[in-house]
Amino acid sequence: MDMQARTSRESVVVACPDARPPAYQAAIGLGRAGMLKRFVTSYYHDPESLASSLARRISPRAFARWQRVLVRRHDVEIPAARVSSVPSVDVALKLESRLAGKRPRLKRAVAKARTHWFDRHLARRLAADPPETLLVFSDVGAGVSLPLCRRLGIGTVLSMVHGDVREEAEVLETEAALAPDFFPMYLGDGALDQVELSWLHERRLRDLALADLVLVPSDHIADELASHGLPRERVRVIPYAADCRRFRPLSGKRHEASCTFLFAGGISQRKGIKYLLEAWAQVRRPGWKLQLLGAAPKNLGPMAGLLDGVELLGRVGHPEVPAHMAAADVFVFPSLFEGSAVVTYEALACGLPSIVTAAAGSVVRHGAEGFHVPARNVAALAAEMERLGDDPRLRARMSAAARSRALDFDWPRYHVAVADAVSDLSRSQSLIRTEADRRAPSHRRAEAAAKPNTRIR
């Protein structure tokens, strides 16, 4: 269906308190379809604003350095006039990172205040100018905004960017028992606050209970939700994507006996780092290397004894990531708990055969663009690393398949899928309201029309 033919009404508010790509891409897709009313987010960079102009003039070098960060907080297809920016979210997150591990109770209080502040800000906007539909990302609206939408008859779409919290509870319990030495690194340098996590899990379960439609990025998450009783008709699987223009295979690349395995992401136990390093210890050999692209814990702890032949590349700027990926030969991502890691799509776009777990949420097909391995299965992980490392012809074949697979999952496809999902919900709810109005007695319709305004304090 032609996106402009779908609807021309600006009827959808998108809300996400950070700069994650799926949120920005959802706003872009709805904007292209003529459906975006407003994008409520944290700091949004407007390069044409007075503040940006002054910064360029006063300190051009410093501004140029910041541009590398700010480029992820802006898109030309999301006009600043459509954005409601809440920069206090970023200030709170910075404070939380400094308090982590030092002042857990204070850090927890700041996290709750940040979440409630954004939720109330969003609710005030919804009450003042109600949209037809709210597309809200995880952890945002469970306290005020989603209940308000119920009262006002606003349709609600929840975009889950993480796995099911009951699965994470099982992962935590298992890791605490099987890997007590690595368990403190579950979040890398981030201290695991079980009290805060329980509060977050409760909010996420309330998100699920209140949303009319739930978008998930992988079949794995859809299956988990179904196993806990969420009706399939309330769930739609919409995988993420990569920017295939930025993430491309290395031109003229030759697949030879040497092999570079790459992991990218936060170096933490949640990403399965213990099992990757143990598998590497079994397969490493001359001419092979394992690169870890991402921020490593300041205290390497039990990792320190497993780093022979491992290159710690550290955290690099987003513009430098494609080159690092394209230079590798195999992508390895044995995560224990994810939504659907965008990095797995980016690796495919760079033509990297990939070894992933089901929890990674990847669109890799076993035997086509790479291999699936069970979580925590070091022997299986080592076997697939060895198979790809030993066979340059297999890597070459899977490299071509990986690029082709990535092109099937580009952001324009995601744009259309999100707009279709929102449109379908809007149509179904419109039919329900029409039928309800037809059956309602005339005095009840009059009462509904005279509902008082909702105020959010």
Image: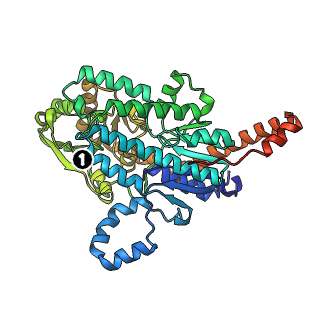
Return the residue nearer the eye: 32 or 436.
436
Q: Position of residue 124 (x, y in %)?
A: 58, 51
Residue at image position (55%, 66%) is 81
Q: Is residue 413 visible?
A: no
Which residue is rendered at x = 29% and y = 34% of the image? 192
Counting from the top left corner in percent of width and height, residue 352 is at 33, 45
In this picture, residue 413 sits left or right of residue 319: right
Q: Is residue 6 above or below residue 201?
A: below
Residue 28 lies, with reference to residue 340, above or below; the image says below
Mark 1: give few (<14), some (14-19) or many (20+) Cα within 10 Å. some
The quarter of the picture where residue 299 lies is: top left
Residue at coordinates 37% horizontally, 23% vertically from top-left? 170
Q: Nearer the viewer, residue 354 or 344?
A: 344
Type of amino acid at the residue the image marks with label 1: Ala
Reading the image, the residue beneath label 1 is: 295
Residue furthest to the front: 457
Q: Viewed as shown, does residue 444 lie left or right of 185?
A: right
**Residue 262 higher or lower than 176, as above or below:** below
Percent of width and height locating residue 257: 20, 43
Q: Position of residue 22 (x, y in %)?
A: 48, 49
Instruction: Note whether residue 380 is visible.
Output: yes
Residue 110 shown left or right of residue 301 in the figure: right
